[in-house]
Amino acid sequence: MYQKVFKRLLDIVLSLCGLVCLSWLYLILIVAVKIDDPGPAFFSQKRVGKDGTYFQLHKFRSMKMSTPHDVPTHLLENPESYITRVGAFLRKSSLDELPQIWDIFVGHMSIIGPRPALWNQYDLIAERDRYGANAVRPGLTGWAQIHGRDELAIDEKARLDGYYVEHLSFGMDVKCFFGTIFSVLRQDGVVEGGTGAIGDRENGK
């Protein structure tokens, strides 16, 4: 009942409150992004949604207009060179994700769930299929985000996403929600191009 009814109801109510209460912050960030690097303040990208369907995910643009599109950050050569000054702050504070509150409101995403993969991240999509993690709405944050975020290797990220789906409940979502607050405040796991960084450190790389 929670997964089929109440989770979506909570998403609608909380995302609507977020859109209204944070409208002033949206305006400030829109101006800051456009001043720092002329161009659109928002960035959209094709992502994988529930049951393998596609949708357009929205973010505040944190990278220069010259950045290659649809390329995961960890596959860019010297990704820091593409990030704007305002963008670096947005990414470290996770404020670049705020436009996804709209994606939650319209039903493409949930507040809590596996982070939506890029349409061409075939390795991550395949690994998530093994754990049934593509069968739920992707989230603004999730179990993997509070256990390593950018530093996680693909197989470990998929395993954690699968654990979330297996234990999906109101209690699990509450854990992810408050765990995310602490992770954002500590800026845990924010490593540009850092997929697999935890494993690299453990292997002495």
Image (cartoon, rainbow, N blue to C red):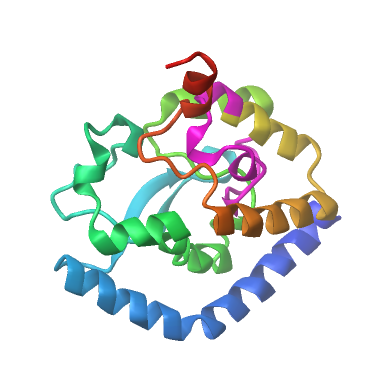
Count of numbered circles in the view: 0
- Quarter of the rendering occupied by the C terminus: top left
Is 190 or 61 nearer to us in this picture?
190
Query: Which residue is depicted at the point 22% across and 67% down?
Result: 40
**Which range is magenta?**
133-156
Is 157 or 180 nearer to us in this picture?
180
Q: Is residue 125 left or right of residue 4?
A: left
Across and down, in percent, residue 129 comes to 60, 26
Query: Which residue is depicted at the point 19% across and 68% down?
Result: 36
Across and down, in percent, residue 78 comes to 22, 35
Across and down, in percent, residue 177 comes to 69, 57
Whether residue 61 is visible: no
Across and down, in percent, residue 136 comes to 65, 44
Position of residue 4 relative to residue 22, above or below, is: above
Is 17 or 193 nearer to us in this picture?
193
Q: Is residue 169 left or right of residue 98?
A: right
Query: Which residue is depicted at the point 44% across and 86% down?
Result: 24
Whether residue 10 is visible: yes
Q: Is residue 118 left or right of residue 126?
A: left
- Quarter of the rendering occupied by the N terminus: bottom right
Asked if residue 35 is among those painted magenta in the image, a careful observer would answer no
Position of residue 97 relative to residue 187, above or below, is: below
Q: In terms of image quadrants, where is residue 156?
A: top right
